[in-house]
Image (cartoon, rainbow, N blue to C red):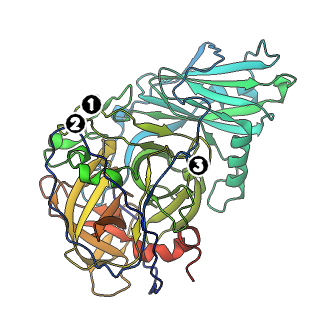
Amino acid sequence: MRSVRHAAAGGWALTLALTLALTLAACGGGGDSTEPPAPSDANPSLARIEPYERTVSMGAVLARSLEADPGVRVQPEAIVLEPLQWRALKRVDPRVADRRAVAVGLSRSVAATADVTNTSSQWTWQPLESGGWAAAIRLRAPDSAGVRPGLWVRQLPAGAVVRTFGVGGGGEVTAATIRATLDRLRASESARRDEPLYWLPLVYGQEATVQIELPAGVDPAQVQVALPRVALLWSLPGMAGDLRSEAPGIGELRSAETCHVNATCSPGYEAQGRSVARLLIIQSNGDAVLCSGVLLADTARSGRAFLLTARHCVASADEAASVETYWFYRSSTCDGGATARGAARRTGGADLLRDLPDQDATLLELTAPSARPPDGVVHAGSLLGRPVNGTDLAGLHHPAGAPLKLSLGSLRGTVACTSNTPGSLSCARTTEPSAGYLSVTWSQGITEGGSSGSPAFATVAGQRYVVGHLSAGSSTCADPAALDYYSRFDRVFPALRDWLSPQVP
């Protein structure tokens, strides 16, 4: 969940009041619920960006469901990988102080498809009735909950389609999209320009098939690609093949979490919950991790999908390109039973617009057609000033990748934080106006590993606005009053203004 690399953005004041009023109706939650008392308002004079709901005209209409069986199915003999032996891995427990994102998998090399020559020997091209060709490679990873292949491209003909499929998950992507992403990575200062990979859509379970379909008139010899690495997941909560019961301390919640509160129980926060996504990321160190993020509104209500998360979750263009998002992922009932229907997965990665090491902040944009959020998602509003100490706050997040949880508490004060070692923050309370972080204590619920990057909301005139995103903390069920630390949005905003409010001088 929380952790960091941060700093302060320096003094800055906004004098222009932003007025894009839009009322969001909370849609009700289902099941028996006890609505918390109305929170106390933050300072109504603070400038703010108003939220809005994503509509059909803004959403991407996908020609094929990401869960659909491919129209062309080629099933070769499986390449069997050695077991990952994740049980022997010693991971940092994400529930102790200074927690990072929750690791749920690890990438590894694949000798049989390590380069173009080896990979080419694995394809068996079959003619199609359309006049085109199709070939596939099947990867089997015993003892895995999910398989996500990384594609390296020397040459991929125009018109080609690459698919992944298996028992669930998967998806398809065009050669044009893959090439465009890899070109951006090669040009990026923060990416590995020597051999950037395109991480194909995750397939649930122990086996994934990678298939390439070529249009008529294209010679299969033009395909020069490799599958040098594959990310193997030992846990992906809520999805098929979840191995959490065998992996204590990895991706599960402790003590049945009598102190975690399902967001479903508080329908008054339903609209804000629709702005929060669970993120799956392949980090540069090879870890597959879970974090949280929030979709932000811009003053133009442009429909552009700006996603804010913690930099210790996504710190480079490579990591951004690997992002998969999960929307509307919540429990169907208050008691935390089955996952509610309507949960939506989006693949295709993201573009890294700006990262701020000193504020542990990263702004992404979901631009690929398959990556754009579904209709009904809310672009969250944001507060462009610091609320006063004692202001009631609400956190919405995915601890350990679990269905959406709600935490209620209050702002204790501002803190100055520095990162002494990767994955930790050293914070001290201060009255310095430019201090970059907020300290928060909870009266209901806590946060946990996987909550990193999630928003805290304050209320102004009955509407809720993002005031920060989670970077680090120590709250636990045993000590819910321990401090959590949120990077201040009003200190992050000046660096994001070109995207979120370019008309403000």
Q: Quadrant of residue 136?
A: top right
The residue tagged 1 is 338
| Label 3: element kind | helix
The residue tagged 3 is 321
Dot 2 amino acid type: Thr
User: Which numbered disc, 3 or 2, marks the residue that appears first in the sequence?
Assistant: 3
Badge 2 density bin: few <14, some 14–19, many ≥20, Cα 10 Å? some
**Residue 3 drawn above or below residue 400:** below
Q: Is residue 245 left or right of residue 113?
A: left
Dot 3 amino acid type: Ala
User: Which numbered disc, 1 or 3, marks the residue that appears first in the sequence?
Assistant: 3
Q: Quadrant of the N terminus?
A: bottom left
| Label 2: element kind | loop
For the residues bearing labels 1 and 3, Cβ distance under 8 angstroms: no
**From this viewpoint, is residue 95 visible?**
no
The residue tagged 2 is 333
